[in-house]
């Protein structure tokens, strides 16, 4: 478990590892992307500072598609 400063709760909140959306490196140290129980999202930087985070939405129409006529994508196992 770990504590974050939730900007919606306006207080410290204890989260478990099921609330982790990602971990990556930054020049400031490791960054943990979290998702609070209330729906807020943020990042915990180097285990010290918590800040809000915006989520980029990806629409289905924006996903890459296989080229038209790609026979491999049209086949269905029988």
Image (tube, grey):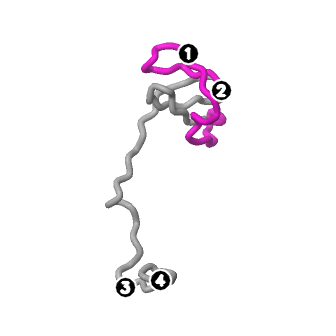
Query: Tag on residue 69?
Result: 3
Name the one closer to the observer, 43 or 14: 14
**SS at mark 2?**
loop
Query: Tag on residue 12?
Result: 1
Chief secondary structure of the magenta portion: strand
Measure how far apart labels 4 and 3 are at the Cα level.
Answer: 9 Å
Nearer the N terminus, badge 1 or badge 3? 1
Asked if the residues shown at circle 4 and circle 1 are in contact, with their CB atoms under 8 angstroms apart, the answer is no
**SS at mark 4?**
helix
Where does label 2 land, which residue?
A: 47
Mark 2 against mark 3, which lies toward the viewer? 3
Name the one closer to the observer, 60 or 27: 60
68 over 28 or under it: above or below: below
Which residue occupies 42% across, 81% down?
74
- Segment colored magenta: 1-30
Q: What is the residue that sits farthest to the front in this orientation?
A: 78
39 over 62 or under it: above or below: above
Residue 34 among magenta residues: no
Residue 38 position within the rendered picture, expressed as x and y whole percent measured from the top left: 45, 25
Nearer the N terminus, badge 2 or badge 3? 2
Measure how far apart labels 4 and 1 are at the Cα level.
Answer: 51 Å
Where does label 4 land, which residue?
A: 72
Measure how far apart labels 1 and 2 are at the Cα level.
Answer: 14 Å
Specify few, some or many for label 2: CA neighbours under 10 Å numbering under 14, 14-19, or 20 or more.
Answer: some
Measure how far apart labels 4 and 2 are at the Cα level.
Answer: 46 Å
Q: Quadrant of the N terminus?
A: top right
Specify few, some or many for label 1: CA neighbours under 10 Å numbering under 14, 14-19, or 20 or more.
Answer: few
Mark 4 against mark 1, which lies toward the viewer? 4
51 over 65 or under it: above or below: above
């Amino acid at each position: 478990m770990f504590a974050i400063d939730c900007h919606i709760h306006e207080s410290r909140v204890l989260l478990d590892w099921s609330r982790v959306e990602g971990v990556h490196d930054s020049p400031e140290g490791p960054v943990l992307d979290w998702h609070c129980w209330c729906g807020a999202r943020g990042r915990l930087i180097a285990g010290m500072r918590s800040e809000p985070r915006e989520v980029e939405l990806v629409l289905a129409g924006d996903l890459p598609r296989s080229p038209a006529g790609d026979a491999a994508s049209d086949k269905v196992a029988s």
